[in-house]
Amino acid sequence: MDPIGEKKPDIARQGNEFRIFTDGDALYEDMFAAIHTAQRTICLESYIFANDRVGGRFIELLCERARAGVSVRLHIDAFGSLPLMFSTAPERLRTAGVALQWFNPPRPLRLFRLNRRNHRKLLVVDERFAWLGGFNIHEESSRRHHGDGHWRDTHVRMGGELAGEAAEAFDRLWRGERKKPLPVPSAGDAFLVTNHNLRQTHRFRRLLKRSMRRARQSIWLATPYFMPDAGTQRAMARAAKRGIDVRLLVPFKTDRPVTQWAARAAYARLLAAGVRIYEFQPRILHAKTAVVDGHWSTVGTANLDYRSFYVNFELNLISTRIDLARELARNFRDDLAVSEQVTSERWRRRGLRVRITELVGWLARKYL
């Protein structure tokens, strides 16, 4: 029986329970059910929290639980959610008793700080269950409200000790405690990686590169924004040259054309090394996952770009559990079935206009 009350095909082991979501409506309904039954605490943070029908439902439930005496904390990135900031929703939330905090709100004398953003998407309920991944809170991720063009994304629900780790990660960023790093588990097959202080800024990138260096069979990467540093590109290219099946899945349709220009600027080098690149065709791909050798995997909020590696606050699940990797790999293969492979021959034939846009995107890649 599902812990929220509905029977679901969960993956369970060692007290931690996982469920992968690739459909926004199913994810939101799961979150709504958990929020509705929360007894003690609700911690929610999101980069985009839209003032639409999806966001409105979250606001309604958060207000209801706060009025019922549940401790509700809501941490929203100011840059990503400006329309909500200037709506009536914040006053409604605070009146109901929700503790609302904006990450890096715009201030005339501190505009330079807006470059750093809270890109995390995390919900923790009663410190028993946590939801983490790429889904923002907006209608674009809902088939019900946005139609067949809704974004393709990935989220994971966690239980057990991981939910406690997620609660601690939320609390530290909420309190602005950035000097002391989160504890690194000495054992276990799944843990959370954040970058809330200088010691941990590059940890996710280092773990990803190490997994690629150690790969023996396959490296499957999915990301909506591909603007990696030179070291990550080298790790991908070297793995492909030594015979590893390296596949990169990126979107064909995008909400940020300049980032796509920058991504395509890296195609030629990777294709020459033997990396296989696919562009997801049906809709915007926003999933951020990786599977290495069928057992090491990650899902979370970090893109393969400079902003996620060096600037934004991010949060990812790292796992060596075969069952979780198998689920993510199955989703990856399903996405490849509706993607178009970018071949070296096709890429060599691209026109001058495309090459110019690549140059523009690549020069701006560190600021996108």
Image (spheres, helix red, strand yellow):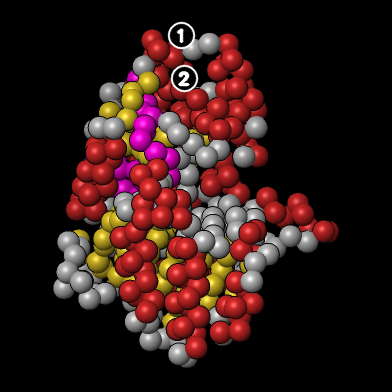
Q: Position of residue 242 (x, y in %)?
A: 31, 23
- The type of residue carrying mark 1 is Arg
Residue bearing mark 1: 349
Rate crowding at label 2 as few (under 14), some (14 to 19) or many (20 or more) other CA atoms within 10 Å: some
Image point 27% across, 47% down: which residue? 328
Q: In which quadrant of the rendered view does residue 243 lie?
A: top left
The reply to whether the C-beta atoms of the residues labelled 1 and 2 are less than 8 Å apart is no
Which disc, if any, is residue 296? none
Rate crowding at label 1 as few (under 14), some (14 to 19) or many (20 or more) other CA atoms within 10 Å: few
Is residue 361 rendered to the left or right of residue 329? right
Eyeballing the image, is 239 above or below 113? above
Is 282 contained in the magenta span?
Answer: yes
Q: Position of residue 301 (x, y in %)?
A: 46, 52
Which disc, if any, is residue 269? 2
Q: Earlier in the sequence, mark 1 or mark 2?
A: 2
Viewer-closest of 169 and 10: 10
Is residue 209 rendered to the left or right of residue 173? left
Image point 65% across, 58% down: which residue? 82
Eyeballing the image, is 130 above or below 22? below
Q: Position of residue 37 (x, y in %)?
A: 34, 82
Image point 28% across, 28% down: which residue? 244
The part of the chain drawn in magenta is 274-298
Quadrant location of the N terminus? bottom left
Q: Say whether residue 22 is visible.
A: yes
